[in-house]
Image (cartoon, helix red, strand yellow):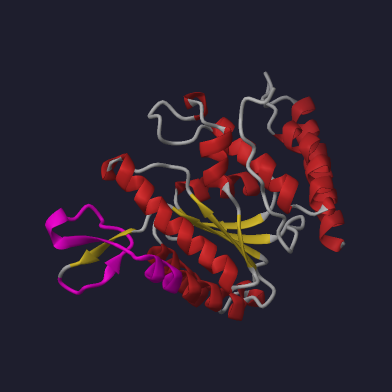
Amino acid sequence: MDFRTIVDIPKPGFRIEPLERILFVGSCFADNIGQRFAEERFDVVVNPYGVMYNPASIGHTVDRWLENNQKEEGGGVISTAFFTLGTNHVYRLRETGEIVDNCQKKPQKLFQEEELTVDECVDYLSMAVEKLTKHSIDINIVITISPIRYAKYGFHGSQLSKAALLMAADRMCRKYNNVWYFPAYEIVLDELRDYRFYQPDMIHPSSQTVEYLWEKLTENYFSSRALQFLHDWKPIKEALGHRPFQPESDDYKSFIAQTKEREQQLLSCYKRQ
């Protein structure tokens, strides 16, 4: 007897390789997943200008990051980008009409809150995808919807916001052959319905939930080489994270030196392939 529904995860037309350079832009869920990739030694850029919740702000981040990385060696080329959409609500500065990415704790009366339509979400995301593709020709973009609900909209309002994002994500996958959808939102709502998978605020996913999504992501998006790297890296990672009783002892210093040498050998091995 099965007591839960399992979300089908479509296989993408690409695979993530070990030590890839990956860009994460979006809600705090992007921070969580991006940090998980960093722990596994991927070369990640995570929300370089702060957490971004809506498609317009994600587009602004991509523009700014591309502009600031043109002079970087290799042009800052990346292999994969993750866009994690949180809401279609935006704040427009009344004085200029500009959509702002951060209200910087200024008085609410200076801003006008609006909801992007599905078409507007697609337009902002399309500009970001096309600029990234022009910059990194072989890039793949993965869109996810943050499972975090926005109680301030009311839960019905939050669902309407997510619905607009879901429709925009689906249209993006149909529009571009290098855009894919990873169903983090559906996995949390359908497979992990119990509140034990949330933080005490009952809104944000717990670390256990993030780990579960990481497992689903690796199972479906990682190449065999990437999975092998995770296997080889795990004991070294655990050794580096070990907390000794006597951190200043010669034995421990020797242990750390040997472990770091193993780390460098492993990284060099996978970089050469």
Residue 107 visible in the current orientation: no
Q: Where is residue 203 shown, x and y percent of the image?
A: 40, 35
At horizontal 38% and vertical 29% (from top left) the residue drawn is 201
Residue 259 visible in the current orientation: yes
Q: Is residue 222 left or right of residue 96?
A: right
The quadrant in which the C terminus is found is bottom right
Image: 198 above or below 266: above
Q: Nearer the viewer, residue 238 or 194?
A: 194
Would residue 114 be counted in the magenta stretch? yes
Q: Where is residue 7 shown, x and y percent of the image?
A: 63, 42
Q: Where is residue 210 shown, x and y percent of the image?
A: 57, 38
Q: Is residue 27 left or right of residue 114?
A: right
Give the farthest residue toward the left: 109
Q: Is residue 204 left or right of residue 228?
A: left
Q: Residues in magenta?
A: 95-124
Residue 112, picture quadrant: bottom left
Image: 173 above or below 160: below
Give the farthest residue toward the front: 1
The quadrant in which the N terminus is found is top right
At horizontal 27% and vertical 42% (from top left) the residue drawn is 152
Q: Nearer the viewer, residue 51 or 218?
A: 218
Would residue 45 be counted in the magenta stretch? no
Image: 5 above or below 122: above
